[in-house]
Image (cartoon, rainbow, N blue to C red):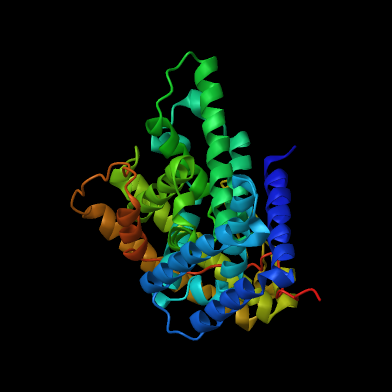
Amino acid sequence: MDTAASHSSSSSIMFYDFLDKMRNPASLNLVKSIKSFIVSFQFSSANPENDSERVQEFFSTMEAAIMEHPLWAGATDDEFDCSMEGLEKYIMTKLFSRTFAISPEDVRIDQEISEKIHLLQSFLRPEHLDIPPFLQNEASWLLAEKELQKINAFRAPREKLHCIMSCCRIINNLLLNASISENHVPGGADDFLPVLIYVTIKANPPQLHSNLKYIQLYRRQEKLVSESSYYFTNLVSAKSFIVQLNAKSLSMDEIEFEESMQAAKLDSEVSQVEALQAQMDPISSTRMHGMKKSIDGRSNYPYMEAEPGELTVEDVERLLSLYKDVVTKFSSLCRAVRHPSATRTKPSLPVPKGRDDILLQLEGQSQIIPEEKEEVHKVKSFPVKN
């Protein structure tokens, strides 16, 4: 069975089993405690550190209450764990809009990371990260990328973390198979982390910073251990590497890196102008689309086959604006090439750290908030059975 489908199915079963128990009249006191906590939390002022402590303390309190409750008398460890997973999902789905990407700083950090990754996608190759040719498998890496891109489809910390784990397990299995076929001794994190960085750049998962911070703060801490902790910490490290990434971070000439970044920025700006024009004047945009011609197989440019009589006043104004922008960027690029910046220290691949260090990383960098997706699972209140 497909891993993602299997996880989704088991997650739904444990969640609805939890809801079913909460509808039992015998659980009325538990239901009151849960609702009271949600209401008081929603009306308190946001503070991620304090909010995390409150949520973790409530999980611990409810764990003790559920263990002693008659409805769970004789329950196995797995059944009890399923109920706690259901509780986490219920609580965090209800509090999602109050706890996820709530600060302007988180929004900014998400945006900056997404924009930087978008630029890197246009030219970064596996060899720039020193990934050996026999470990390169971009077709299969697509599976890992898709798992990471699902992260915003969920609201529960457990399910977001599962997207990360699925991505990492795919990478790990591919590396293991490649090593066996090549009689290569597996390099552990030395092989794994560069591939994870590359997959993360190709995937450009939405709101990466906010998702990592959310999982760190609100996943039950006893569950963020062993394999989960290892993969999660590696993705935090991959994100940190991307944030700090420059020419010295890669096996790439500094001038080539700067030129590639400038070209990617220019392409991005042209695409934004074209998208804006399409929104404002869809008829003109459709007409001009037929006048585009591919240049060097890399990107498309308008007006290449246009005749003077076909240009409108708006087209001339746009061309003048683009011309000025290109001249400005070209001049800046020329100055940068003549006077290359001082050599910067090459940041090594970050070493996974403990929970407190990870939290400091998540709190202290800069980025944005790209896309918003609604989670598929909607949680309803507990109607108590008569």
Locate residue 12: give its quadrant: bottom right
Left or right of residue 259, residue 270 in this image: right
Which residue is located at x 35 percent, y 59 percent? 359
Residue 307 in sight here? yes
Which residue is located at x 21 percent, y 55 percent? 339
Left or right of residue 64, residue 377 in this image: right
Question: Which image quadrant: the C terminus?
Answer: bottom right
Residue 304 in sight here? no
Q: Closer to the camera, 194 or 70?
A: 70
Question: Which image quadrant: the N terminus?
Answer: top right
Name the outermost residue toward the top: 183
Name the outermost residue toward the bottom: 43
Locate residue 91: give its quadrant: bottom right
Which residue is located at x 42 percent, y 18 percent? 185
x, y (%) of residue 286? 74, 70
Which residue is located at x 67 percent, y 47 percent? 7
Q: Closer to the camera, 150 or 358?
A: 358
x, y (%) of residue 24? 74, 68
